[in-house]
Image (cartoon, rainbow, N blue to C red):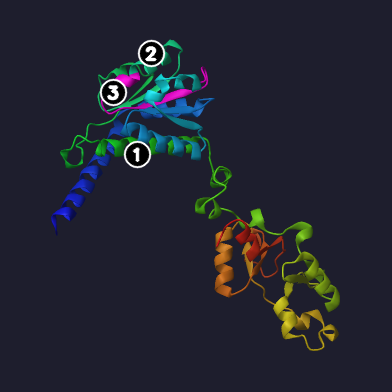
Amino acid sequence: MNKDLQIAKKTVQVEINALKKLSSSFGRSSQFSKAVNLVYKTRGKVLVVGVGKSYIVGIKVSSTLSSLGTPSVAFNATDLQHGGLGAIQKNHDILLVFSVSGESSELNSILRYANRHNISVIGVSCKSSSMLLRNSTIKILLPKVVEAGHSLAPTSSSLNFLSWGDSLAIACMKRKKWTNKKFITTHPSGTLATSLILVKDIMAKGKEIPIIQSNTSIRLAIKEMSKKKLGLVCCKEKSGKISILTDGDIRRHSNNLYKKKILKVSTKNPNWISDSATALSAIEKMNSKKITALLVTRHQDVNKKIKNVVGVIHLHHCLSVGIK
């Protein structure tokens, strides 16, 4: 193994050791739960503050909090000192401050302002006697760790800050019962959102479903198919069983088509999917079957022989919301 790879493996191992120390530290203090309680009860925003790389970590922590139901904004401590303090809503917002040493001079005026106006501060530092923890409402002491390569640049400590912030965000998410459906509302674009969209969210339903009785004439069936523009029409038999008449069925039986009965032309065993399935799984099923639409039934009925059709999901429904 060459020297570069040895250094890479050593770096990762040092950072893994740091995370192990962080994990062990949770069992020795109740401060984390106090931080979760404070964030959970906050009526305003969590203002995440840091200097240098701690600020960069804070941006990610703030973004994760916001994504998972806790409104948050990140600030560079320097910016807060030059007018940014006006962004703090007194009696509503709280501060979450990251600093390895807890002694950064940029934090002095911010902590004084917070104490003067009774603004709660969650201080996260690796030094128990630091100025930050002395002036914090909730004092989060993280373990001192070896930085990768024994360098002065924060590596392992930044990773621990990041992991601690993720832990806070996830704990608050669980308290708030923040679901994937709610996650979608704050992520209208991107693959994360589209992968969580459910069939029932985008399917044709109610009067949009093309459906007729199986004893209807072919001519009226085609009229219904053309009106609903899904390339098929559901044909309901007296027993309640559903077959479908598709564009393909019409082409295959085009000779003397209007003299034929629907049940002689239609597809007897159409493909179904649950309304609670993801739209991504629907498009995967369509691709595997080489079809462009699926009938939709309720989750509890999907394995029954006779199903009630509650919707139709078409390939175009999926494409229109960005699922490919």
Which residue corresponds to the image point at 38% horizontal and 35% vertical from the top-left? 165
Residue 290, quarter of the rendered image: bottom right
Horizontal relation, residue 92 to residue 168: left or right: right
Residue 68 location (% of width, % of height): 49, 39
Q: What is the distance, in whole Å, between disc 2 and disc 3 at their CAs? A: 14 Å
Residue 100 location (% of width, % of height): 27, 28
Closer to us: 264 or 101: 101
Horizontal relation, residue 189 to residue 118: left or right: right
Residue 259, quarter of the rendered image: bottom right
> Quadrant location of the N terminus?
bottom left
Q: Is residue 213 above or below residue 317?
A: below
Q: What is the distance, in whole Å, between disc 1 and disc 2 at their CAs? A: 28 Å
Q: Do the CB atoms of the residues marked 2 and 3 lie less than 8 Å apart?
A: no
* The stretch drawn in magenta includes residue 78: no
- Tell me the residue that label 1 is attached to: 163
Q: Earlier in the sequence, mark 2 or mark 3?
A: 3
Label 1: how many Cα within 10 Å (few below 14, some 14–19, many 20+) = some
User: Can residue 282 be seen here?
Assistant: yes
Which residue corresponds to the image point at 75% horizontal and 66% vertical from the top-left? 229
- Tell me the residue that label 3 is attached to: 102
Q: How many marks?
A: 3
- Tell me the residue that label 2 is attached to: 112
User: Can residue 241 be seen here?
Assistant: no
* The stretch drawn in magenta includes residue 101: yes
Secondary structure of the residue carrying tag 3 is loop
Find the magenta span and give its range: 89-107
Residue 291 location (% of width, % of height): 62, 73
Residue 1: numbered disc: none
Amino acid at circle 2: Arg
